[in-house]
Image (cartoon, rainbow, N blue to C red):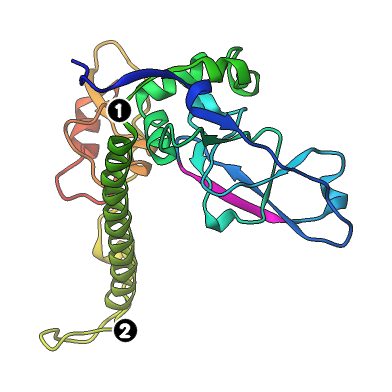
Amino acid sequence: MVPENWRHQKIVDILDRVSIPVIPEKNKAYREIGIRSHGKGIFHKDITDAYRIGNKRVFQIIQGALILNIVFAWEQAIAKTTFAEANFIASHRFPQFLPIKEACDVDYLVYFFLTSKGKHLLGLASPGGAGRNKTLGQKEFEKLNLLLPPVKEQRKIAKILQTWDRAIATTEKLIDASKQQKKALMQQLLTGKKRFAEFEGEWVSNQLSAIAKIIVSPVDKKTVAGEAPVELCNYTDVYKNNRITRNMAFMRATATPSEIEKYKIQQGDVI
């Protein structure tokens, strides 16, 4: 059910492409931008100059614009330019759009194109095969028809989503900091550099073979008639997981009763 005041509008009626050509000057530094796929935002390239830019057409970044990477727009390489990109440049592969007489909110449009519906529409505007052949077409993009709420509602929706983004970013930073603190604590505890009052005794050196029973299984990956069916824990199972559990999908093979008895995995084993 569509809200009563939402309207279908074409991109060409709400956005205007804006481009300010830049002619690179000798002995002057420039910074170009790029856009990551999957809505991961704008990144800044290394400092460049007129010699490196060569004959490539470049344009001034306009603050507050909707910007796309036409080569990967179908992969949601879309963002909004900010003050951080002031005085930067971009090639012709990064078209920029500004609202026509406040007909839409750029933040809202970015969020919209990061939805599955938005990705579908960007794909429709990017005909061709996979990868670099799926280039966003200017005319196809302008013809896209979006179902939009009034601008005031667009802004409110965008602000709500931005608040969630900030909360998620803060949480991710706290998690990263906690992981680093845990690593530091592990390094100190497991090397004896940090000890607590309740810890007793001195550390001693031991060879692994003196404190653990080391078993190297010769069971192969073959299926032999007459042998019992088994599930094999392989290298990748250990490499990709911190724990081996019953619900994992193991390779199937066969083994003899003596092999099963000697080499079966026991709870608490270190692999």
**Left or right, 103 with reference to 30:** left
**Left or right, 23 with reference to 38:** right
Mark 1, other Cα within 10 Å: few <14 / some 14–19 / many ≥20: some
Count all numbered tags in the image, as a single digit: 2
Q: What is the magenta range?
A: 40-47
- Tell me which residue sits at (23%, 31%) in the image: 248
- The x and y percentages for residue 208 are 32, 64
Quadrant location, the N terminus: top left
Camera-side residue of 266 and 97:
97
- Tell me which residue sits at (27%, 39%) in the image: 157
Residue 189 lies in the magenta-colored region: no
**Residue 95 figure quarter:** top right
Instruction: Identify whether 202 is placed above or below 271.
Output: below
**Left or right, 142 with reference to 156:** right
Q: Nearer the viewer, mark 2 or mark 1?
A: 1
Residue that label 2 marks: 193
- The x and y percentages for residue 231 are 25, 26
Residue 44 lies in the magenta-colored region: yes
Which mark, by number, is residue 149? Answer: 1
Instruction: Identify whether 141 is placed above or below 54.
Output: above
Instruction: Identify whether 147 is placed above or below 248.
Output: above
Instruction: Identify whether 2 is placed above or below 19.
Output: above
Q: Is the magenta region chiefly helix, strand or loop?
A: strand
**Residue 132 figure quarter:** top right
Helix, strand or loop at disc 2?
loop
Circles 2 and 1: CB atoms closer than 8 Å: no
Residue type indicated by callout 2: Lys
